[in-house]
Image (cartoon, rainbow, N blue to C red):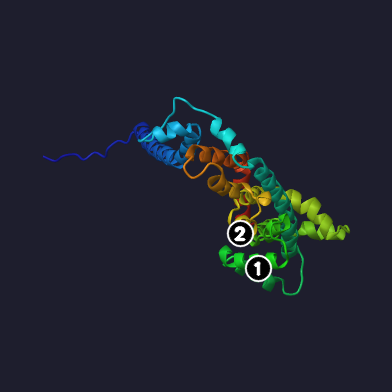
Amino acid sequence: MSRSLKSPVRNPELQESRVRRKERIRNTVLYIFLIFWALIVLFPFYWMILTSLKSYSTYNAEYVPKFFTLAPTLQNYKDAFTAVNLSRYFVNTIIFTVVTTALMVVVITLSAFAFARLDFRGKNLVFTGFLALMMIPTELVVITNFQTITNWGLRNTFTGLILPSVTSVFYIYLLKENFEQVPDELYKAAKVDGTSDLKYLIRVLIPITRPTIVTIVILKVIECWNAYVWPRLITDNEAYFLVSNGIQEIRENGFGRENIPAMMAAVVVISLPLIILFLLFHDKIMEGVSRGGTKG
């Protein structure tokens, strides 16, 4: 007796339901992983803020650390501004950050324009040399910068703090790539109309590449705010300390090494401006970096 073989009838709705189920499972696993990873990343910030809200006696009485506090206090934040001249450190950091960032934007904009649009002898060789500098670790040039600034008599001055940071090979490269994405026809048309190179840069290139420039400014502000090695090396006068150096000053001459809650309060105060800055402009940072990596 022969058996008739029938091909199975496929149900489109059933297949679609299975696809949706697999997609939901995949998304659920992905979100669980991302939430878990976010908790790991954010936990140090939570612990920093929690510790800053505990009193010194409460913190020392916890033989087993607690993940909450029933008696939060803001006294540690008050002590952060009274133990040392933290407000002066903030002013110094703002001056250092604003001046350094402004000078750097001018330097890298003019340099990137020269490499992207101007023709001069040895341009490719000079630019290759610039790129080669990116392979030299920063630590190797710190000693040279220190000797130069010291020989010029600029230790314990804002000029000595600022000068080594007014340029960046990476930012020149990033901005040059953005300038080169602007069609050459615009530059040629501007030259036919009698527009100078500087006017073309200010009125055409800078407005078009504004997202990248904003990104560079934000990243430079973060870099200046977090600067530690160079300011610590070139200044030993408290009048020129930055907030990053202020943390060490607080630990050595302020609260002492054992007052951890007060130290955490100072860290929260110093970190808060950068956290707010990143939350406000993280979209522009991503946009500018993606533009720098896109050609054509």
| Depicted 246 relative to depicted 167: above or below | above
At horizontal 49% and vertical 40% (from top left) the residue drawn is 259
Amino acid beneath label 2: Leu
Q: In the rendered structure, which disc, 2 or 1, sits on the residue that comes first in sequence?
A: 1
Residue highlighted by disc 1: 147
Q: Quadrant of residue 270?
A: top right
Q: Decide which of 7, 76 is in the foreground and name it.
A: 76
Q: Quadrant of residue 229?
A: bottom right
Q: Decide which of 51, 58 is in the foreground and name it.
A: 58
Image spot of residue 203 (x, y percent) = 81, 51
Q: Residues within 10 Å of mark 2 (few under 14, many from 20)?
A: some
Residue highlighted by disc 2: 233
Q: Decide which of 243, 44 is in the foreground and name it.
A: 243
Classify residue 113 as left or right of residue 284: right
Tag 1 secondary structure: helix
Classify residue 193 as left or right of residue 36: right
Q: Decide which of 258, 265 is in the foreground and name it.
A: 258
Q: Quadrant of residue 91?
A: top right
Image spot of residue 4 (x, y percent) = 19, 39
At horizontal 75% and vertical 56% (from top left) the residue drawn is 106
Position of the C terminus, as image quadrant, is bottom right
Q: Residues within 10 Å of mark 1 (few under 14, many from 20)?
A: few
